[in-house]
Image (cartoon, rainbow, N blue to C red):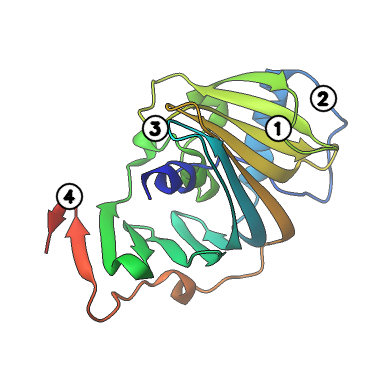
Amino acid sequence: MKRLAAVVLVLGSCAWAAAQAPPPMQNADALARALQQRYQTITDFSADFVHTYRGGVLRTQTSERGTVKVKKPGKMRWVYTAPEQKEFVSDGVKIYSHIPQDRQVLVSPMPADGDASTPALFLSGKGDIARDFTAAIVESPVAGAVGLKLTPKKAEAQYDYFVVATSQPLLQIRALATRDRQGGDSVITFMNLKENQGISDKEFAFRIPKGADVITNGAGN
């Protein structure tokens, strides 16, 4: 769960497709600014995703899939459907992490804007990649896209950097890759992306399942 929180409390300040797109660019700082500007025009989006993880201390390899919905400011719902069910929801105030088989719900506060330097939080309208990261052009984790490596200017406990894979010239996100502190590589690839659909706030309301233990900030309730 900690690894997923690092990715889902990860995923970056990414820009989605826009009607008028700039020409392809290979300057990292210019691409970071363009992504930030495009991303600010998106109020909500949904997509299917595949999440793969390789490496880490235990040298594990996993592949999972599910759906994601995001609405600014600060609302997210990540639903993993296979091979294991789990859910990560932010209502803009709190973040809920739920794995049904564990019969637990972990609850934590949404970080303040100035502390939101993980990729998923950027997707929900917090943070600024041009301000908070050092950018570099690298190989994309998926074919047919440009990779933008973003290294946090302030050291992060859960990851070293992440890479945004974006198609050009539309600046549509294709994937997000993260390198964690244990040397593991996590890649989330997006499909069937839809933006500015007017997603209802009701999609981000989380109800504590009956019989589940609630753990807030590491303390049982």
Name the quarter where the C terminus is drawn.
Answer: bottom left
Q: Quadrant of residue 13?
A: top right
* Amino acid type, residue under disc 3 in the picture: Gln
Image quadrant in which you'd find residue 171: top right
Viewer-nearest of discs 2 and 4: 4
Of the two numbered discs 3 and 1 in the rendering, the one whose residue sits closer to the viewer: 3
Callout in the foreground (1, 4) = 4
Secondary structure of residue under mark 3: loop
Front residue of this view, candidates 134 and 7: 7
Residue type (three-letter) at the residue carrying disc 1: Ala
Write down the residue under mark 1. 34
Q: Nearer the viewer, mark 1 or mark 2?
A: 2
Residue for point 53% across, 60% down: 71
Label 4: element kind: loop
Vertical relation: 100 (above or below) 43? below
Q: Which residue corresponds to mark 2? A: 25
Give the CA distance from mark 1 to mark 4. Answer: 39 Å
Q: Secondary structure at mark 2?
A: loop
From the viewer's perspective, is the residue at label 3 or at label 2 nearer? 3
Type of the residue with mark 2: Met
Residue of label 3: 158
Q: Earlier in the sequence, mark 3 or mark 1?
A: 1
> If you read the primary sequence from the N terminus, does the residue marked by circle 3 or circle 4 appear first?
3
Q: Are marks 1 and 4 in contact (CB under 8 Å)?
A: no
